[in-house]
Amino acid sequence: MILVGENINIMSQTLGPAMKERQAAPIRKMAQDEDTAGVDYLDLNIGPARKTGAELMPWLVQTVQEVSSRPLSLDTTNPDATEAGLKVCKGRALVNSVSLQPERLEKILPLVKKFNSEVIGLLWGVDGMPRDVNERCMLTVDLVYKFNEMGIPNEDIWIDPIATPVTGEISQVKACLEFFQMLPEIAPGCKSIVGLSNVSNGTPSHLRPWLNRTYLVMLERSGLYSAIADATDPELIAIARGLKPGTVSLIHKAMDGADIDTASLSPDEIKYVKTVRVLMGEALYSHAWLES
Ligand code: THG
């Protein structure tokens, strides 16, 4: 599993202000921490950054490149910021992201081509969020066609079906799982990615890792190639690196509805089993899902 560290992010309570004030030290520290944690890419998320994005993104890229040589994912909806960031990236970048909205396609795809970047194709249609797995498949076909027309080959396209919170419609959480099983047939050679922490958005922060880790294992079983994820969770990294085969097989068993004798499990193992039940839609989510 390829991991893209999510932590350099304008929404962060500490790094958001650091970005706005161009304080390099906290950003460098986080970049170093993510690098040491062993993620493969670093996501630099500055949000819409309408006014100052074209200065902020290159500053951020250069600040991070002082301490890490990992490839970067440039995460902004401001195309001028993307372009300014691409100009100073030392390695090949991942452009996060391009959807089917015509203005995104027209502005960003030429940059992807010009800078020979990889690109995340976000399955966000002209009418917004796809409602089910079929809409995700249709959007994929359209998107890959448009990217190919611009000369971008499938192996440089990372499809993102948009992971949604467990607190919302559970059918959407399951649609992502199903989608990754179908992707190799619909778009052979394309890679895939999700914003993993989306699934735990709105849940108590100390419990988020259980949802993130469990969903990662479930998605990987469906064929997921990569995840934008929390680099500060060592257990999540260990799972993604294949160092927790016991946890993975327990989660698979729970997905298959096998009879699991919970009396023989550790408290942490019981948490994984309960979390699978919630993510599969077999138990209703509540903030107390691990206690019941
Ligand atoms: N797909 C793609 N890109 C994405 C997403 C996606 N980029 C943004 C997001 N979704 C993935 N990145 C994050 C980054 C942080 C959090 C969630 C997703 C997060 N942060 C905590 C919070 O906001 O509460 C902690 C912030 C802090 O450090 O203070 O939840 O789906 N292509």
Image (tube, rainbow, N blue to C red):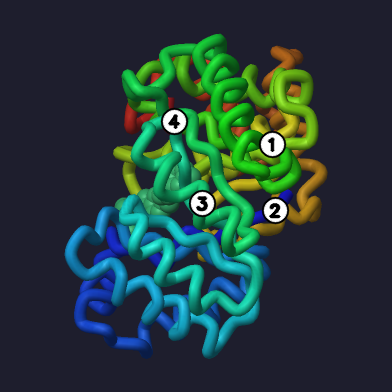
Foreground: 53 or 198?
A: 53
Between residue 160 and residue 52, name the one nearer to us.
52
Q: Residue at image x 51%, y 51%?
A: 110
Kindly indicate whether the residue at mark 1 contacts the one at mark 4 (C-beta within 8 angstroms): no
Query: Of circles 4 and 3, which is in front?
Result: 3
The quarter of the picture where residue 45 lies is bottom left
Q: First in sequence, mark 1 or 3: give its number.
A: 3
Name the residue carrying label 1: 224
- Decide: is 25 above or below 137: below
Amino acid tagged 1? Leu
> Is label 4 in a helix, a strand or a loop?
loop
The circle on residue 110 is 3
Residue 199, horizontal then vertical, whole percent: 44, 35
Q: In this picture, is 176 found above or below 217? A: above
Could you tell which of marks 2 and 4 lies nearer the N-terminus?
Answer: 2
Image marks 1 and 2: residues in contact by CB distance under 8 Å: no
Circle on res. 2 = 2
Image point (28%, 76%), residue name: 19
Task: Give the SS element for disc 2.
Answer: strand
Numbered tag placed on residue 100 in the rendering? 4
- At label 4, the amino acid type is Leu
Q: Amino acid at mark 2?
A: Ile
- The CA span between labels 1 and 3 is 27 Å
Lower position in the chain sequence, tag 2 or tag 3:
2
The percent position of residue 162, horizontal first and vertical second, equals 47, 32
Tell me the CA gap for discs 4 and 3: 14 Å
Query: Dot 4: few (<14), some (14–19), or many (≥20) neighbours within 10 Å?
Result: many
Hey, which quadrant is residue 40 in on the image? bottom right
Of the numbered discs 4 and 1, the one sitting upstream in the chain is: 4
